[in-house]
Amino acid sequence: MSTVVAQALHVFGLRAHVANNIFFFDEQIIIFPSGNHCVKYNLDQKWQKFIPGSDKSQGMLALSISPNRRYLAISETVLEKPTITIYELSSIPCRKRKVLNNFDFQVQKFISMAFSPDSKYLLTQTSPPESNLVYWLWEKQKVMAIVRSDVQNNPIYQVSINPQDNTQVCVTGNGLFKLLRFSEGTLKQTNFQRGESPNYLAHAWVSDDRVIAGTDTGRLCLFESGDQRWETNIMVKEPTSSKSLDVIHKSESLIEFPPPSSPVPSFEQMVATSYPHHMSMPQVFAIAAYSKGFACSAGPGRVLLFEKVEEKDFYRESREIRIPTDPQSNDPSQSDKQDVLCLCFSPSEETLIASTSKNQLYTITMSLTEISKGEPAHFEYLLYPLHSASITGLATCIRKPLIATCSLDRSIRVWNYESNTLELFKEYQEEAYTISLHPSGHFIVVGFADKLRLMNLLIDDIRPFKEYSVRGCRECAFSNGGHLFASVNGNVIHIFTTTSLENIINLKGHTGKIRSLVWNLDDSKLISAGTDGAVYEWNLSTGKRETECVLKSCSYNSITVSPDGKVIFAVGSDQTLKEISDSLILREISAFDVIYTALTLSHSGRMMFVGTSVGTIRAMKYPLPLQKEFNEYQAHAGPITKMLLTFDDQFLLTVAEDGCLFTWRVFDKEGRGIKREREVGFAEEVLVTKTDMEEKTVAAPFLAPSMLASQPACNCPDTACLSTP
């Protein structure tokens, strides 16, 4: 195997549409899915530990944690086959306890899971059309009972087990609310539905015989032993102004169900007569019970707390919690319009955490909700504002430990990979396709759908100071010295200088869209590759092609170049990694049934990393082996779009279509990392062991910040501009 090792350090991202995607391991540690991992995150100390998905996994579908907090169940699809993996959380690192992947019943995927109160049994629900409810003695991989939950192929959203009784289970879905009891090897339904049932999206046990369920029309129904005892309706007025949420009000109707003979009008009749047509119905996607009652999502950006009324059988709304508007959004009035998909209380009930449809995590201290009586309380970000769509651009620089990313969510974010923090964040009107960070860390160039923009990174803002009419730029790159930058417009490359900000040369020759650009070390040449199967090496002084290699059967995704500039590496649609030199393909190395989507080579020239269409990372030694010699790591839950190494070769950065950003620590043989000094003119590579006990210095040519070309002149009057000397 390869001697190159990558260790996941930190991730910025959330897989919001994994069922049951956030919960507490203890008072300080939460667990959530990100990329193709589950992350254990310490809220106080800010460290992360990773539980990787299964090999060949196509993504996580659902999670469940046992009541004793010892076990974590993960539902995945592995090689088109459904799999449930149960991890032991108490071991360090977390180890696999059991894998359930051999089934004697039809199943496409498991969409919801729940442990029994003693953690010995696991309840799982399969997707339609089978819709099987399976009751496992999971430690022995034994099916205790199986029954079809629904025969009409309706969606089923959640299953649970009574927190006080191993044998009683609840299933909710579209037109479905069922209580079943396990007895004598079978699951038997114990309640009977009267009339047509609504679309139940979520439920929670509030006592040993009571379940609260929420619908897609804002109804909350309380069931006791299967019979409906109480109902309330959450209403939200449409705001009259899009600029403020102050006009949004709540309205609820509390109804205790009368005897069947009572002449009291039905709930539907009361709603029809009490509320005019301008009311809209919020969807209840999440419910979480706690000692005083329960919390539920109540439409976009809202969570309501309900408390039990003393000596009565119903609950009354006690607090409202809202997601705050974000001033960095391109439309702050809409930034809070996110559906809350999952809610979770800490063991002490001091903290409530919410995950949303925009891949965000929010938190609130419950004591704060007591203070804000009469006014809605507000969540705050648990981590940082995270990307909510595919990340299309990734860049880093020499002078500062910064990462710049852009995304189809129309945002730019600047992260710090040493402190694992978000430095800057801003949303725009247009989608951002590509980004490059000036070696100084003071400027970025960004390709938007409408224009190419050169922008200043200020202390608290990202501000454009030059725009170019390059529409839909999909690739851009600053030169290593920072005195030039290249941008792509379809099949043409525009070269600009950062001293006068002028377009100095245009490179024409590609017949298809250009997908990747890379500068050689001394910036004398630029290499490009595209969908036309062409890899061109351009001489910047003449504007002519020096070498070319065209293979029309391959659409290239990414290229890089060796430190000496003599060898070009390219990956594309033909599932190979190519070594190209002097217009000839020297070697083609198989990708073994995956498509390589990104690659990067270390500045030392000894390590290569490639990203795949299935979200994995492969670490290889250079020179490249002919055999299947690489270490493969689970990383993302979608194709990797970009990857690169920091200037000192210590950190690997990867982004993907799943909207997650990973940082990895990389080592070569025997755990040695490459360390470069940041501020020397002729840099030194220092091979450093993990214990830093033995050091060996090797000289290597490298452009230090003091050798950078002059930086762009900033025309803005802002005194906060970081480019000011």
Image (cartoon, grey):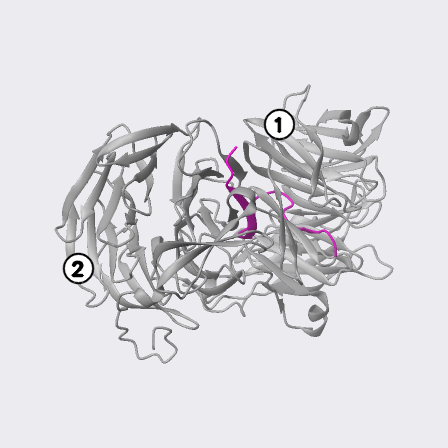
Along the viewing direction, whichever of 409 and 210 lies nearer the viewer:
409
Q: Residues within 10 Å of mark 2 (few under 14, many from 20)?
A: some
Is residue 17 on the magenta stretch?
Answer: yes
Amino acid carrying label 1: it is: Gln
The disc placed on residue 152 is 1
Q: Earlier in the sequence, mark 2 or mark 1?
A: 1
**Marker disc for residue 182:** none
- The vertical placement of 509 against 423, above or below, is above
Q: Is residue 502 left or right of residue 357?
A: left
- Above or below for 664 versus 426: above
Residue at 52% across / 32% down in the picture?
1
Q: Along the horizontal axis of the image, is 77 left or right of 682?
A: right
The disc at residue 503 is: 2
x then y, percent, for residue 716: 29, 76
The reply to whether the magenta stretch includes residue 274 is: no
Predominant secondary structure in magenta?
loop
Question: Circle 1 sits in a helix, a strand or a loop, which is it?
Answer: loop
Q: State whether residue 241 appears in this view.
A: yes
Q: Nearer the viewer, residue 310 or 105?
A: 105
Amino acid marked by disc 2: Asn
Residue drawn at x 53%, y 44% is: 6
Judge whether 126 appears above or below 285 on screen.
above
